[in-house]
Amino acid sequence: MPVRILSPADVPSFRSLRLAGLQRDPAFFASSYEDEKNRSVDELSARLIATEDRAVFGAFDGGRLAGIAGVYRHEPRKYRHKAHLWGVYVDPLYRGAGIGSALLSEAIGFARAMHGVTQLNLTVSAANPTAIRLYRSLGFDVFGEEPDSLFANGALHDELHMALRFAKPRPENQPLNGHGDDRPSSATGSAMSPAIAIRTVEASQAMACVDALADVLIDCVEGGASVSFLLPIERKTAVEFWTHVAESVMRNERLLLVAEDPDGRIVGTVQLITALPENQRHRADVAKMLVRRDARRRGIATLLMTAIDDAARRAGKSVLVLDTVTGGEAERLYERSGWQRVGHVPNYALTPDGRFCGTTFFHKQLPPRPDAAGES
């Protein structure tokens, strides 16, 4: 099920689902139905304006909002190293399908990408074991319990405080060394772009995308990405590669996803290779996750990785595998997107300028997991 960042245009569906959660499970949220139902459209619109320090994610079944999760960074200077997860709720009709895990993976990735943030905190009802198990499965640990924290439905309720600790962030001036940088730019402070469209390229459209995809590949290789090609990369070489990919799409051997800007320009891409031996039909390989340099730091890589997970589930795949340059920004992207590191092979490949570089292998398991009912 697709997960994306919500915008003010999503206020009606966001308001409806959030109020439903507050009314159904009042003891699982710090906010109350009575307070939330009186919030104005302007207040809710402001809440759904995503920036580099906050966002609300939504999971959609067609046009229906099925789940939500919010994350924000604390504003006080002494708390700027912490982010907070809030408002997690999945419509009961959609529970048990992994939606909670998908929403939380996106929220965790967003928080991990905030420069200087070292932990993500949350508060959850002690009487919500499903949510607690889900959070623990994603790496959260309990660091405290507050007795009688909430008063709801005429009774007092205990709450648990949980935290997910991140590794120390990469220095902000460290150069990119990998497929793409998904962190929003702290220099501009601009909002996340809601206008990027992710689509699966149909077999009949694959050849028409070759030239634009060649532009993306050339830009990434010239920017230092180690993605199987050396400098100087000729356009003929790039076109031949994407022609091969298009032919493979037409043979139903792989899925090709592209990210397009508001002008319809292809600015990113990723592939799901499904043509594997018969004893590996349950899995697929993720390959060539590329984002143009002038389109980075806008969340495009995260959107592509979320979409490829969803495409893999629809294709009946339960295990995904990929590899990337060791020490590159892509490593951080995959880790915050829920991928598990398998191992590192030194001197596995060459950078575009001919230097040896290591490669790190990752896997991701895609079975559905229980969903959280909500908190905050």
Image (cartoon, rainbow, N blue to C red):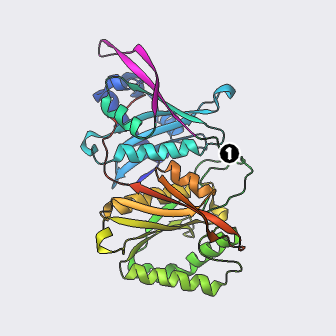
Residue 154 among magenta residues: yes
First to last magenta residue range: 140-166
Q: Residues within 10 Å of mark 1 (few under 14, many from 20)?
A: few
Q: Identify residue for label 1.
A: 189
Left or right: where does residue 18 sit relative to residue 196? Answer: left
Q: Residue at x 48, y 63 (%)?
A: 322
Q: Residue at x 47, y 80 (%)?
A: 245
- Quarter where residue 282 is shown: bottom left
Q: Residue at x 59, y 43 (%)?
A: 51
Residue type for callout 1:
Gly
Residue 202 image offset from top left, x and y in percent? 39, 75
Residue closest to the eye, 178 or 84: 178
- Majority secondary structure of the magenta segment? strand
Residue 306 image offset from top left, x and y in percent? 45, 56
Most extreme residue toward the front is 346
Residue 244 image offset from top left, x and y in percent? 48, 84
Q: Quadrant of the N terminus?
A: bottom left
Residue 152 image offset from top left, x and y in percent? 33, 17
